[in-house]
Amino acid sequence: MKKAVTIKDIAEQLNLSRNTVAKALNGQYVPESTREAVLKKAREMNYKGLNAERLDAVARRYRILLVSGKPLNNINYFIPLIKGIENYCFEKNFELFQYTFNKDRTPFGHFSEYAKSLKPDGIVAIECFDKAFIEKLLNIGLPVVFNDFSVNDIAVNRSYDIISADDERSVCGIVKFLYDKYKITKFTFVGDAKHCRSFYERYMGMLKGLIKISNEHNKRNDILCSDESFDYGNPHAIATEILKLRYKPECFICCNDFVARTVCKALESLNIRVPSDVLIVGFDNVSEAISMYPKITSFSINKEFLGRETIRTLITRIENPDCPSRTVTVGTTCVQRESTGKY
């Protein structure tokens, strides 16, 4: 009986290490010329470790288009997320292209022409929350995975996937925790809950937490101004809204750490101390959470893992274009800091 061909046999034929050959056969990163040589030799030698279909899949070099609704490189949250996307594509030898779309400055036709000329296998959409843009994007007919999503209903009969943090459960849990620990019942949400699905789910998480502790809530006790007309980075504007609230909050739940830091500055201007007089919770666990006193309790998500999982989800969508839409949820960890310290 003829001896089966092994990875060692292929490596010896090509004068490569067994580790390099194994990486090439398993779709891990090796130089393009090396990968092609290994796959060619594997076919010639009738290597049985991978069938023809699998060899073709390994040989497939996906072209991925990352489209964002705003520049991302200078935003703390997105730096590790993009790193995860880039590293995964590098390891798998995928081609990655990036395009920043500004709905107020860029006609969609320009983007559509670019996408058609690029001929990507799939699209990753980040910070793309505009309903009209999403509908046009899906109508291109390519596999799409969204990192976070719009709060609006999308009138397109196409399958797509969404990946996000476990926003609702996370905030619901901190509300219950603070009630159990401090008997806090007066919560105020700060942020535009209609900005994107993650902000909306964080708001819903607070409301569900209040239901669990049997506490009624009125949205007039929240600061929910549209971020198209309200500056959440302006402490004076936040302070003005705080003074309008019907009651003195015991805890502010903020849509992210950037807003939480602004709330801290606004409270300082009103001579309200954190955490002695009021508690603050943020989200995302970025540099704003620890940039100054008080350090803010926040929810951390492994952003690099989130980026890698985004590409893995897209590849599944590319290879299974008719599968139903999915929402992939990545868990968070609550990092407790001074802003929810005992008072």
Image: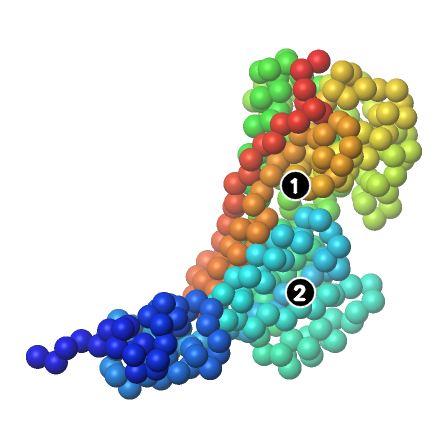
Give the residue displayed 66% in from the left and 39% down from the top.
285
Nearest the eye: 43 or 327: 43
Q: Residues within 10 Å of mark 1 (few under 14, many from 20)?
A: many
| Numbered disc 1: secondary structure | loop
- Are circles 2 and 1 on residues that touch, CB within 8 Å? no
**Is tag 2's residue or tag 1's residue first in the polypeptide sequence?**
2
In this rendered view, identify the residue nearer to me: 8 or 204: 8
Name the residue furthest bottom. Answer: 44
Nearest to the eye among marks 2 and 1: give it: 1
User: At x 42% / y 81%, what residue is drawn?
Assistant: 36
Residue 300: numbered disc: none
Q: Residue at x 67, y 53 (%)?
A: 78
Amino acid tagged 2: Val
Question: Going by the image, does 279 lie left or right of 230?
Answer: left
The alpha-carbon separation of the residues under discs 2 and 1 comes to 21 Å
Q: Secondary structure at mark 2?
A: strand
Q: Quadrant of the N terminus?
A: bottom left
Q: Quadrant of residue 175?
A: top right
Q: Where in the figure is residue 116, as x and y percent of width and height? A: 63, 79
Q: List the residue tagged with mark 1.
A: 284
Amino acid on which disc 1 is placed:
Asp
Q: Label 2, on which residue? A: 67
- Looking at the image, residue 51 lies above or below residue 250: below
Residue 190 percent coordinates (x, y): 76, 33
Q: Position of residue 254 (x, y in %)?
A: 72, 34
Quarter of the picture containing the C terminus is top right
Q: Is residue 176 visible?
A: yes
Name the foreground residue: 244 vs 289: 289
Residue at 59% across, 66% down = 123
Q: Position of residue 179 (x, y in %)?
A: 61, 17
Q: Is residue 221 above or below residue 289?
A: above
| In this rendering, position of residue 109 left or right of residue 54 | right
